[in-house]
Image (spheres, rainbow, N blue to C red):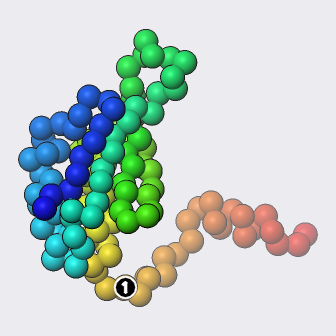
Amino acid sequence: MPITLQSTAGGFSAEFTSKLPALERAMTEGGLEPADFVFSKDSAAPAAMPFVGPFFYDYTVFTGGESFTVTEPNDLRFLDYISDRFLAAEQPDEPEVARPPGAIGRFFRWMAQPI
C-alpha cells in the first residue's frame, strides 16, 4: 500500500505524486512499510497573514506514534529531503575524512591564543 497523503494547503503537486512510487520502492527495499507513513502538508504562513500566499509549507511525517515536521518551499524539495533521509539510513557509516580548517576556524584559533 502507498504512503498516505493529506493536505490543508491545496494538495501535493503532480510531479511529487509521480515521483512518490520511487520513494516507496526505496523504503520497501530498506525494510520500511510505506503504508505506515502519512505525509501531511500545511501552510507555514501565520494565520494573521492569510492574504499573503504561502512561501513555505510545513510537511509533517507521521509513522507509528512518532512525527516530525520539516519546512520547505515546495513539494519537490520535501521529496528530496525525505529521499536523502531514507537513502542515508540504508548506507553504512563511512569514516569521516578530516578536512583542513577553514579561514573562520583558523581565525578563532588565532584569537584564542594568549597574548
Residue 29, given in percent of the width and then of the height, sits at 15, 77
Percent x, y for residue 4? 23, 51
Residue placed furthest toward the right:
115
Where 9 falls versus 102 (above or below)?
above
Residue behind mark 1 = 93
17 left or right, relative to 68: left
Give the class, few, some or many, for how many residues have Cα within 10 Å of label 1's Cα (few <14, many ≥20): few
Q: Nearer the viewer, residue 75 or 7?
A: 7
Residue placed most toward the observer, 110 or 30: 30
Q: Residue sitting at 80 percent across and 68 percent down?
A: 112
Q: Quadrant of the N terminus?
A: bottom left
> Where the C terminus falls, by quadrant?
bottom right
**Secondary element at tag 1:** loop
Q: In the rendered view, does 105 fall on the left or right side of 68?
A: right
The single residue placed furthest to the front in the displayed view is: 65
Q: Quadrant of residue 114?
A: bottom right
Q: Residue furthest top?
A: 51
Q: Is residue 51 above or below residue 8?
A: above
Amino acid found under the numbered disc labelled 1: Asp
User: Residue at the spot x=55%, y=65% of the render?
Assistant: 102
> Measuring 40% from the left and 31% from the top, which residue is drawn there?
43
Quadrant location of residue 82? bottom left
